[in-house]
Image (cartoon, grey):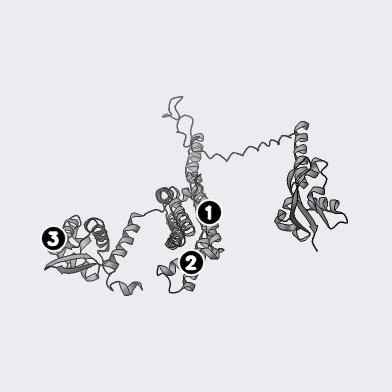
Amino acid sequence: MLFTRLSDDLFRPLASPSRAFNAVLLLHLHARVFGDTAEPLRKTELLAAIGDFSADFAQGEIADDETTPVDPIERRSAVYRRLLDAGWLVERRERYVPVVDFDPEARILVEELARLDRGETRSYGGAVLDVLGSLESAIANPAERSEALVNAAKASRAFLSHLRTLAGSMRKIEARILAQEDQRAAFRLYFDEFVARHIVSDYRTLHTRLNPFRFRSGIVREAGRALRDPLTLRALAEAGLREGRAPDIEAAERAARADLAEILAIFEGLDRHLDAVADIVARLERRIAAALRYMDHRDSDRIERTAAALRAVAGADEAMTDAPASGVSLLRPPIGAAQLYAPRLKRPPMDFEPLPEIFLDPVVEAFIAAKDAFRHRVAVTPDRMADFVEARLGRKGSLRGSQIPVTDVDAFVVFQRLRELDVLFDGTLRTRYRLSRVEGRVANGWLDCPDFLIERSR
């Protein structure tokens, strides 16, 4: 639907010989001329702004052909007519005064071009927190803030697009570096474009102590929980239907599920994109390191020339009349310690230090064993309680609490929980025994409480 909304000739100024001038003029009009006003500009004011901006450019940069006038007054009118005919500007009259404004759809396009020109980088931490905050807001209050779920899905898509853009930009710069025949130009591209623009501003953010992806688990958890909760999905769907984002409740619920599933899929699959970026970084670093290693290669021709000169001096007549005085060297050393090839030093062997053996104090071990024994002794389990009841019931079908003798601490630990027999352990023993309240009290020296009756279930 892009070209059904935009003018057919909209991109003609950006494909003409003066496209560089037209592009910077559009950005200037968007940022400076139309940026501070909410009302359309008068045509005379806009023509004056175009004339002032064109004064800094040569005729060859502005003209598309020989018909472009050279006179500044006529030239600004020609540039204005160029943008008006292409559909970037719209002219109308207000009270007989001609006013000009950007075309609404063209304004959206020039805003994107301005963002591309600025080279805006995306904050990973801000993007991830934006998704997490919107998602938590929508789930915490789905009836009133369901729009936050739509915003979270949009922010997730924008964040994924930025990650793909980062990898694509790195590959593009990698191709430019490898295509350079001059090593200095290659190094300049590597450090100015690759390192300064991406490694420092974008990629480094992924490997800091405050890694923004520490919030990814929270996003995955919240999105997964909402997808599994039918009440939350229903509330989000009802809010979407009430706010007019869907024609019926089924479509609203499908939209909510799709947004949550998209958020979940994006943040669960981020590792693939991060691995692709890491591969590009490692590959370029290896190439640059290899280029630096072999940049100062040995000059074989210089070595051969030096050897030939030494042989000539050794075979010359000793009775040379023009021989230099003693102590004067005939040749300067062609190479020195700084130019000699030094083989890579062997890495020293790693020193392995065995882990020390840790011996526990027997007193500490005895204390740990005593704590485990105490914990086991006071723990009440379903089997332990069933054995206690069966030992007291015997062949009888029922037994009152006041008839149960408590002789030691172990029996008391189980006895004090008998009054909760029907609800303990999620009602596990309810199928075997029935508990009921009876008149009287239990007073056995260990516990004083209302009496109760335990019966086997039929």
x and y percentages locating residue 221 in the rendered image: 55, 57
What main secondary structure does the magenta stretch of the protein show? loop
Numbered circle sitting on residue 256: 2
Q: Is label 1 in contact with label 3 (beta carbons under 8 Å)?
A: no
Q: Is residue 365 magenta?
A: no
Label 2 Cα crowd, 10 Å radius (few <14 / some 14-19 / many 20+): many
**In the rendered structure, which amino acid carries the disc numbered 1?**
Gly
- Label located before the other in sequence (1 or 3): 3
Residue 126 visible in rendering: yes
Q: Is residue 453 left or right of residue 342?
A: right
- Residue 331's x, y, as percent? 45, 33
- The residue sitting at 79% across, 61% down in the picture is 457
* Earlier-in-chain disc, 2 versus 3: 3
Q: Secondary structure at mark 2?
A: helix
- The three-letter amino acid code for the residue at tag 3 is Pro
Q: Quadrant of residue 85?
A: bottom left
Q: Nearer the viewer, residue 433 or 53?
A: 433
Relative to 349, residue 12 above or below = below
Circle 3 SS class: helix
Residue position for label 3: 72
Q: Position of residue 26 (x, y in %)?
A: 25, 61
In the displayed orientation, state which residue is furthest to the right.
395
Q: Is residue 447 left or right of residue 116?
A: right
- Mark earlier in primary sequence (2, 1): 1
Q: Which residue is mark 1?
A: 218
- Which residue is at the front of the view, 411 or 263? 411
